[in-house]
Image (tube, rainbow, N blue to C red):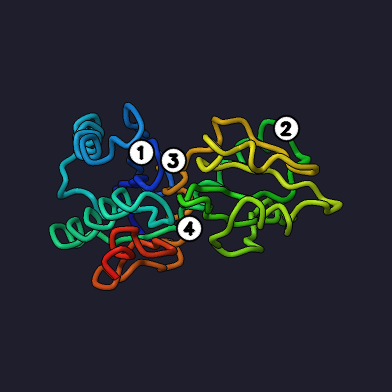
Amino acid sequence: MAQKPLIFAVETSGRIGSVAIAAGERMLAEAAFSGPMRHSSEVFPAIRGLLNRFGRKPKDIEHIYISVGPGSFTGLRIAVTMAKTMHLANNAKIVAVDTLDVIAANATDYIKQGNTDVEKIATILDAKRGQFYIAVYQRTSDGIWKKTLPDSLMTASQFLDRFTGKAEPIWLLGEGLVYYADKFKAEGIHFFDEQYWTPRAAKVHLLSWKMACAGQFADPVTLQPNYLRRPEAKEKIL
């Protein structure tokens, strides 16, 4: 990329949404919403506020980066609809990243604080009905989180049966722990501090920029949220 595009990153898959503005790889600012599940009411004012702060207009946005799930059904629809709208309005290029990967990226911040004993992590999101969206990662020698268990739908008991009792401890993070951390307590299980549990727009940008540099843009026509399972309303209809 010869020029550094103006980028907006949007994270609305989790409980606390956020948006970020960047120029190429350089993060300019990030703004979190005021409370849980405020996505629909605050995402556009937050974007407008960041644009005004840097003297830019919506037409200036060249890339839009979003997390596409799994996560909040409503939040995911908001992000996908916004990305498609910006593409139609400005021909903005879209990058879509996995929400569990976005959460995993928070673990790198913890390691940068000198906590180098973390080698294996699992990201946890509440999928309701006693189930969780879970992915597992191993840290490589160059500090990259390599996914060793793809996004899966399972109970806490199923996760513990599969991953406890190993020689290598596993560290957990993600908003699925907010109300259900006790379900995951077992030998060899460690928990990141809560400040690392929430997916952030800054991490959406971090992961998406690497994909954009590799030309890995989403097709705006076929782009869909990654629900991992159908929304409950659709299941009831069927």
Alpha-carbon distance for marks 4 and 1? 22 Å
User: Which amino acid lies under the numbered mark 1 shown in the image of this protein?
Assistant: Gly
Which of the two residues, 81 or 9, is positioned nearer the viewer here?
Answer: 81
Q: Residues within 10 Å of mark 4 (few under 14, many from 20)?
A: few
Q: Earlier in the sequence, mark 4 or mark 1?
A: 1
User: Which amino acid lies under the numbered mark 3 shown in the image of this protein?
Assistant: Arg
Q: Are marks 3 and 1 in contact (CB under 8 Å)?
A: no
- In the rendered structure, find residue 100 and report the number of the disc placed on it: none
In this figure, which residue is indicated by the disc labeled 1? 17
In which image quadrant can residue 231 be found?
bottom left
- In the rendered structure, find residue 210 and report the number of the disc placed on it: 4
- Quadrant of the frame with the N terminus: bottom left
In this figure, which residue is indicated by the disc labeled 3? 200
Alpha-carbon distance for marks 3 and 2? 21 Å
User: Which amino acid lies under the numbered mark 4 shown in the image of this protein?
Assistant: Lys
Along the horizontal axis of the image, is 87 left or right of 168?
A: left
Which of the two residues, 65 or 194, is positioned nearer the viewer here?
Answer: 194
Q: Are marks 3 and 2 in contact (CB under 8 Å)?
A: no
Q: Are marks 4 and 2 in contact (CB under 8 Å)?
A: no
Q: Earlier in the sequence, mark 4 or mark 3?
A: 3
- In the rendered structure, find residue 114 and report the number of the disc placed on it: 2
